[in-house]
Amino acid sequence: RIAYVNGCYVPHNQAAVHIEDRGYQFADGVYEVCEIADGYIIDMTRHLERLNRSLSELQMAWPVNKEAFVHIVKEVVVRNRVRNGLVYIQVTRGVAKRDHVFPEPATKSALVITARRSDPAIAEMKLKTGVGVITVPENRWDRVDIKTVGLLPNVMAKQKAKEQGAAEAWFVDADGMVKEGGSTNAWIVTQDGTLVTRPADHGILRGITRATAIDAASTLGLKFEERPFSVEEAKNAREAFITAATTILIPVISIDGDSVANGHPGSITEQLRSQFRLEVEKISVY
Ligand code: PLP
């Protein structure tokens, strides 16, 4: 495997960053994960827009210009011969003597890009079987709309889910309303067939898969509401599912051990997932 690190393509097992990189010292960095499907990068424009927003919220500069950036992303995918999988992009504020405030003069942002293969059959299987989720109290900061590499609450929540045999943990706010998963956005389908997901304010990450799923729902003419929903409402919903670039759209069949509807993936989730494929932007790599 080949990784891109600050201007060089290097063997993955020799790729390294400086110990005083601020990503390492302070989690002072942001990232993106894009899906690669059949040799295309999925929804890259939206991912780059979100990266741009994350960078500007943290007053961080682009490490290279956008044309070069796109070229490097494609190059990493090609060099790793990935046709199905994902590409991981990380930008940190760069290397400086450890001090909390931004370095002056500003350091050059550091860029790391890796790509890896995944088996589309595994995602297909999850679509058929569905997954369980647990709920955990929200304990993250109030700017989770910025996609930073500071993910310890997400790590802890997802580990807890794994230990309980679930695939995801949903963060729940003080009012009992579902925010999002540790690495996915959360959705339900109400008994009358309306799709519901929480508004993308500062309290959740504005998922790219979420955005494209909203487009797909509109194409299909499905009813859609952007509003918070409670854990109780989700347990009593007709269907529930999660979205993320790494998994696309996966049915949720149980919440804290209680089954959602009859405990089987629902037809609206499946319909939306099929339409999703037709809705995405595809940038050819090969
Ligand atoms: N919410 C969180 C906390 C995430 O980390 C992610 C993805 O990593 C998502 C939602 C889904 O976002 P996307 O669809 O852009 O992958």
Image (cartoon, rainbow, N blue to C red):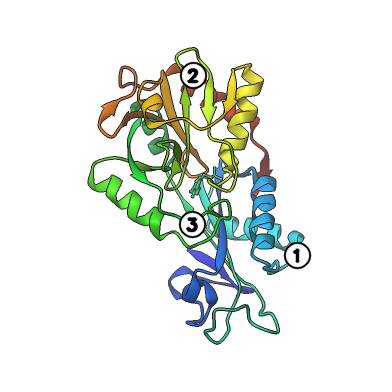
Image quarter for residue 43? top right
Q: Is residue 239 above or below residue 43?
A: above
Image quarter for residue 250? top left
Question: Which of pointers 3 and 1 indicates the residue nearer the eye?
Answer: 3
Task: Name the amino acid, label 3.
Answer: Trp
Q: Residue at x 34, y 23 (%)?
A: 260
**Residue at the extreme top of the image, as rendered:** 192
Q: Is residue 199 left or right of residue 165?
A: right
Q: Is residue 55 left or right of residue 139?
A: right
Sequence order check: which comes first, mark 3 or mark 1? 1
Number of marks present in the image shown: 3
Residue 65 is labelled as 1
Q: Is residue 85 above or below residue 238?
A: below
Residue 279's x, y, as percent?
A: 64, 30
Residue 137: tell me if it is visible. Answer: yes
Q: Is residue 198 left or right of residue 69?
A: left
Category of crowding for the residue at label 1, using alpha-carbon neighbours closer than 10 angstroms: few (below 14), some (14–19), many (at least 20) = few
Q: Is residue 14 above or below residue 33?
A: below
Which residue is label 3 attached to? Answer: 141
Which residue is label 2 attached to? Answer: 268
Give the SS element for disc 3: loop
Residue 164's x, y, as percent?
A: 23, 43
Image quarter for residue 35? top right
Q: Residue at x 29, y 45 (%)?
A: 161
Q: Nearer the viewer, residue 39 or 45?
A: 45
